[in-house]
Image: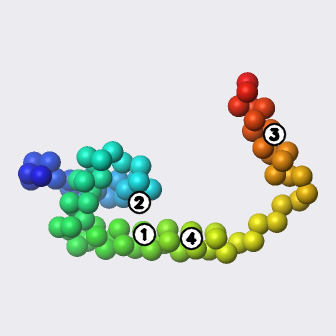
């Protein structure tokens, strides 16, 4: 891409969360990726945010979920009923 279509650090930083969540368009993803390749400061911030996200996901996987009997079914029925409205 030409320098005219490159993101500034502020623009890239504003998109980092959506980049991490894979919620950007293909064009925006490419722009952020290109910025991270040339900007050490933003790349460092990206690595930090990505590591925090990986840590949170790992901790969530470790949580043992025990629901009271029938709660899951009641919630699913309520969601279905709400969706039918």
Tag 4–tag 1 contact (CB < 8 Å)? no
Q: Which sits earlier in the primary sequence, circle 1 or circle 2?
A: 2
Label 3 sits on a secondary structure element that is: helix
Residue bearing the label numbered 2: 20
Percent from the top left, x then y, of residue 6?
A: 16, 53
Tag 3–tag 1 contact (CB < 8 Å)? no
> Which of the pair 71/6 is nearer the observer?
71
Residue 80, quarter of picture: top right
Residue bearing the label numbered 3: 77
Label 2 sits on a secondary structure element that is: helix
Q: Which mark is residue 50?
A: 1
Tag 4–tag 2 contact (CB < 8 Å)? no
Inter-mark Cα distance, 3 to 1: 36 Å
Around disc 4, counting alpha carbons within 10 Å, would you say few (fewer than 14), some (14 to 19), or many (20 or more)? few
> Which of the pair 43/68 is nearer the observer?
68
- In the image, residue 26 sits, relative to residue 84, either above or below, namely below
């Amino acid at each position: 891409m030409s320098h005219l279509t490159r993101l500034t650090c502020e623009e890239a930083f504003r998109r980092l969360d959506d980049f991490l969540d894979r919620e950007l368009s293909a064009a925006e993803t490419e722009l952020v990726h290109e910025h991270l390749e040339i900007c050490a400061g933003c790349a460092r911030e990206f690595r930090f945010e990505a590591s925090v996200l990986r840590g949170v996901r790992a901790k969530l996987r470790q949580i043992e979920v025990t629901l009271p009997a029938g709660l899951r079914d009641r919630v699913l029925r309520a969601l279905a009923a709400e969706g039918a409205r």
